Image (cartoon, rainbow, N blue to C red):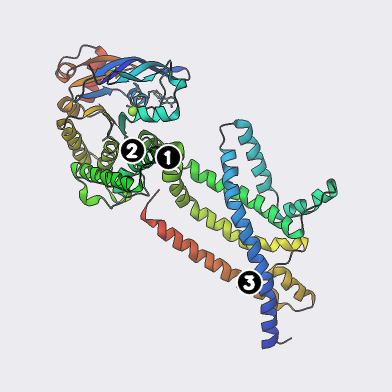
């Protein structure tokens, strides 16, 4: 079938609607998983060993099981086991994504924090700074600089992972395209790549910009 | 009365007793050098003075008042410890400058945070805090001039040579106005051609009358700059005295062989 201008426009608009949801899943996951990851990383670095072990086991499970499976678990398990008023489809996706990404982020944070030399803390201490002053004024910006490259990798992966939402029938761009495929229209599926590439392209530029901004110091 | 009085400091890490009872005192304006072979406990002693390690026993007094007493240490609050540790400054072997801050900011960060806290507690008006900040900056500029780095005030640590970084870290320690400034092998991370500029700064500080404790492997420097030398071995003060005596007529066999090994 030939692609006419009008069909192209119609498909574009429909895909954009799906893409809106893709962006929403992306943004919500990011905004919630970034701080939750920090909490988890503090848990895994805790001096209270049982908490540290428990957190590490949890992170191991979350990182060791496919995200798709986790989406199923969050959506189906509460209603099958306990007959709970379970999450809506969309919320189940967000919950599964946030937990999954928070665990990945927590490991990145942990690596970043543990990589800061002891001397930085000690220099702050002998200058009479408090523990929280040392963390927020000395350590944090060094951690940020260290974690930007691995974080940008994870965040770019997240863009593409949003496509998993469709396994429990949540609408996003690829789901919309699949509906066309079901009607024997194949090109919209390939066309979605343009949207993903544009999104990832913008993120790549953004991270490049941030890295350049932080180029004035070395850690 | 001595400015610093250290009595019976002991410290063990697990099974090894690293400090086995250290006693010494230091007069205001004097320079004490600590020498000794690797592992003898010199760094641990300095870290105890700066509250980076907590001694197991002993008392540290400054100006006649005990700022550390092992028997009572557990009762002290973090704020009290913070107050006490400011009697000492420490210059690290590896500089430990804050990489994300300019030279000037490295010097003013801690004093400004402190001024801000004090202002909050005493409900100081904003204008007076600003005045305090200006004073802190002025003091920092003087210190940078004293270590010969005025023109580097806006540079970042990664743009400086090792010798320059160490001079900045000396100025940074002085910005907190410590009574006693400690150095842990301030030149041993430096290329040989850069040690001179750092040692020169320490000499100038001595001439200004600063009270200092220097752990060093530079024997010539220790001999020139010190009023008193302590030789440590295996966690005790094996021998001490004026530089002429320690270097010229060492009594302990350990010190004799240590000086031979160095020379
Ligand atoms: N945090 C620690 N835990 C366990 N052992 C330690 C610790 N810090 C120091 N030690 C041990 O204490 C002993 C004294 O160490 P210290 O660093 O005080 O020696 P030093 O005289 O400064 O040696 P150097 O000349 O090599 O710097 C060493 O045997 C060291 O291994
Ligand atoms: Mg040492």
The chain carrying label 3 is: A
- Is residue A141 shown left or right of residue B23? right
Would the CB of label 1 be found within 8 Å of ligand 1?
no
Q: At 73% across and 77% down in the image, what residue appears?
A: A186
> Label 3's element?
helix
Q: Does the rendering let one see residue A206?
A: yes
Q: Are marks 1 and 3 in contact (CB under 8 Å)?
A: no
For disc 2, the marked residue is: B94
Nearer-N-terminus badge (1/3): 1
Marks 2 and 1 sit apart, C-alpha to C-alpha, by: 11 Å
> Label 1's element?
loop
Please name whichever residue, B34 or B248, is drawn nearer the observer in this view of the structure: B34
Marks 1 and 3 sit apart, C-alpha to C-alpha, by: 43 Å
> Height in image: B143 above or below A6?
above
* Residue A74 point in image, percent of width and height: 75, 51
Q: At 65% across and 53% down in the image, what residue appears?
A: A98
Q: Do the residues labelled 2 and 1 touch (CB within 8 Å)?
A: yes
The chain carrying label 2 is: B
Q: Do the residues labelled 3 and 2 touch (CB within 8 Å)?
A: no
- Is residue A93 shown left or right of residue B206? right
> Height in image: A3 above or below A49?
below
Q: In which quarter of the image is residue A137?
A: top left
Q: Does the rendering let one see residue B52?
A: no
* Residue B28 point in image, percent of width and height: 21, 23
Please name whichever residue, B2 or B227, is drawn nearer the observer in this view of the structure: B2
Question: Which of the image's four quarters has the C terminus of chain B?
Answer: top left
For disc 1, the marked residue is: A117
Classed neighbour count for the residue bearing mark 2: other residues with Cα under 10 Å, few (<14), some (14–19), many (≥20)? some
Classed neighbour count for the residue bearing mark 3: other residues with Cα under 10 Å, few (<14), some (14–19), many (≥20)? few
For disc 3, the marked residue is: A193
């Amino acid at each position: 079938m030939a692609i006419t201008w009008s069909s192209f426009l119609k498909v574009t608009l429909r895909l954009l609607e799906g893409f809106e949801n893709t962006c929403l899943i992306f943004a919500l996951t990011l905004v919630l998983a970034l701080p939750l990851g920090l909490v988890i990383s503090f848990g895994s670095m805790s001096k209270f060993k049982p908490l540290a072990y428990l957190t590490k086991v949890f992170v191991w499970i979350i990182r060791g099981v496919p995200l798709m499976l986790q989406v199923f678990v969050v959506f189906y398990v509460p209603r099958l086991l306990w007959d709970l008023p379970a999450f809506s489809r969309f919320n189940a996706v967000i919950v599964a994504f946030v937990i999954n990404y928070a665990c990945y982020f927590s490991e990145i944070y942990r690596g970043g924090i543990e990589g800061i030399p002891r001397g930085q803390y000690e220099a702050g201490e002998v200058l009479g700074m408090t523990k929280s002053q040392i963390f927020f004024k000395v350590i944090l910006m060094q951690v940020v600089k260290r974690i930007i490259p691995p974080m940008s990798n994870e965040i770019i992966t997240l863009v593409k992972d949003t496509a998993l939402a469709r396994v429990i029938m949540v609408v996003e761009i690829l789901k919309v395209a699949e509906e066309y495929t079901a009607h024997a229209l194949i090109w919209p599926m390939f066309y979605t790549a343009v949207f993903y590439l544009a999104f990832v392209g913008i993120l790549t530029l953004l991270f490049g910009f941030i890295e350049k901004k932080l180029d004035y110091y070395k850690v | 009365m001595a400015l610093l009085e250290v009595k019976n400091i002991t410290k063990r890490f697990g099974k090894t007793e690293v400090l086995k009872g250290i006693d010494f005192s230091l007069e205001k304006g004097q320079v004490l050098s600590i020498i000794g072979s690797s592992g003898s406990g010199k760094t641990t002693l300095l870290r105890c003075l700066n509250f980076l390690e907590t001694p197991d026993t002993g008392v540290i007094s400054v100006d006649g008042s005990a700022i550390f007493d092992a028997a009572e240490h557990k009762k002290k609050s973090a704020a009290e410890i913070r107050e006490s540790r400011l009697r000492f400054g420490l210059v690290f072997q590896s500089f430990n400058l804050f990489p994300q801050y300019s030279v000037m900011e490295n010097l003013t960060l801690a004093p400004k945070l402190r001024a801000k806290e004090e202002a909050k507690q005493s409900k100081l008006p904003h204008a007076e805090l600003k005045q305090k900040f200006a004073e802190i900056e002025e003091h920092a500029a003087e210190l940078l001039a004293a270590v010969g780095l005025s023109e580097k005030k806006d540079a970042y640590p990664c743009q400086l040579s090792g010798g320059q970084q160490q001079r900045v870290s000396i100025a940074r320690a002085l910005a907190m106005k410590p009574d006693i400034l400690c150095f842990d092998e301030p030149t041993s991370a430096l290329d040989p051609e850069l040690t001179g500029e750092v040692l020169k700064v320490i000499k100038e500080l001595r001439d200004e009358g600063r009270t200092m404790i220097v752990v060093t492997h530079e024997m010539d420097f220790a001999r020139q700059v010190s009023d008193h030398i302590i030789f440590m071995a295996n966690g005790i003060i094996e021998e001490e005295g004026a530089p002429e005596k320690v270097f010229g007529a060492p009594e302990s066999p350990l010190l004799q062989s240590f000086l031979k090994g160095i020379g």
